[in-house]
Amino acid sequence: MSDCALNIFNGIRNSFPECNIFWCALHVIRALKKNLSKINDEEIRSEVEKFMNILCYYRDCTEEDAAKMYKEHIIDKIQDQLEFNQYFTRQWDIHKQQWIAAARPNELTVVNNVSESLFKKIKYHDFGCVKNQRIDVFVKNLLEEVAPNYFYRIKNDLLQTGFIPSIRIREPRLTDYKTKLKREVQSRLYQVLNFVQNQEANLNPLRFLLENAEEKLSQINEKIQNSITYLRSFEIPNELLDTYMLEINEFCYNSPDYILEHFEGFLEDFKEKNNLID
């Protein structure tokens, strides 16, 4: 859940395309009220505000009923309000799934006062009430001042209570690696799609990169699957097998051409290093 700033929405969507993004109802209504003055008819203004509140908070109706209400009491009413209509289309109409409550009947996206309170302390105390800060300055302050300060406070609280937490450092698992890799690939594919949809983009370099890509990826996948079959022939425990597969996946960080050319040599070195003798 986030507020309804489009730059935040676009940033999350570009980085995590599979993520569901919902907008806080309180922030939606607050942002709407700041722009209601663009409607020059008081009756229409009141009706739009009323039904935006209903659509944001009322969950006991079907999506079909909500869509009908949305069209009759908002969209049809603002057609002649040109300035507001442009704003509403850009901010709200194309993002209906983010704020209409009927789209998520089991959840209500309202402000979380606990987290809001914590974020307020961080924003106004640790960052000195600076509303807009350069991202590099923000990251520097976060890493060098804010985080160490909070770790110190946690450590001090633990010393005062005498509580010693049990900390277990878990080795990375293959499933964790695959999940993160899938998200990264999806994000990059989404960025490539945006590039393709740009009418001014020169697609010749992209076409060159994609040439034979599917065939090469299929060949690499076949080699990896053969490696898995080979490793399982030794009846290796699953945890150790995951460790071996992570090493193979790290080798696959290279370009497809490099992997295809050097995979056999890598595999021979891998077998020798781990005493995997036929």
Image: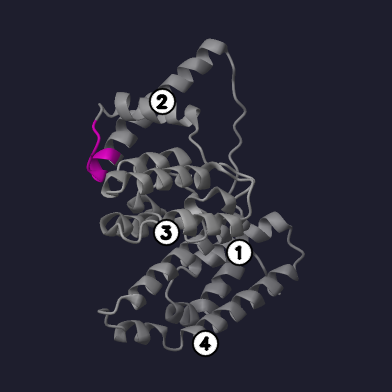
Q: CA distance from mark 3 to mark 2?
A: 48 Å
| Residue beneath disc 1 | 245
Which amino acid, by three-letter code, is at mark 3?
A: Ile
SS of the residue under disc 1: helix
User: Does any portion of residue 24 appear in the rendered image?
Assistant: no
Q: CA distance from mark 3 to mark 1?
A: 55 Å
| Residue beneath disc 4 | 215
Which amino acid, by three-letter code, is at mark 2?
A: Tyr
Q: Residue at x 25, y 79 (%)?
A: 200
- Please determine whether, in this image, residue 229 is positioned above or below residue 169: below
Q: CA distance from mark 4 to mark 3?
A: 49 Å
| Residue beneath disc 2 | 150
Task: Identify the mark nearer the N-term, 1 or 4.
Answer: 4
Residue 75 is marked as 3
Front residue of 99 and 67: 67
Task: Identify the mark nearer the N-term, 3 or 1.
Answer: 3
Task: Identify the mark nearer the N-term, 2 or 1.
Answer: 2
Q: CA distance from mark 1 to mark 4?
A: 22 Å
Q: Which residues are magenta?
A: 130-138
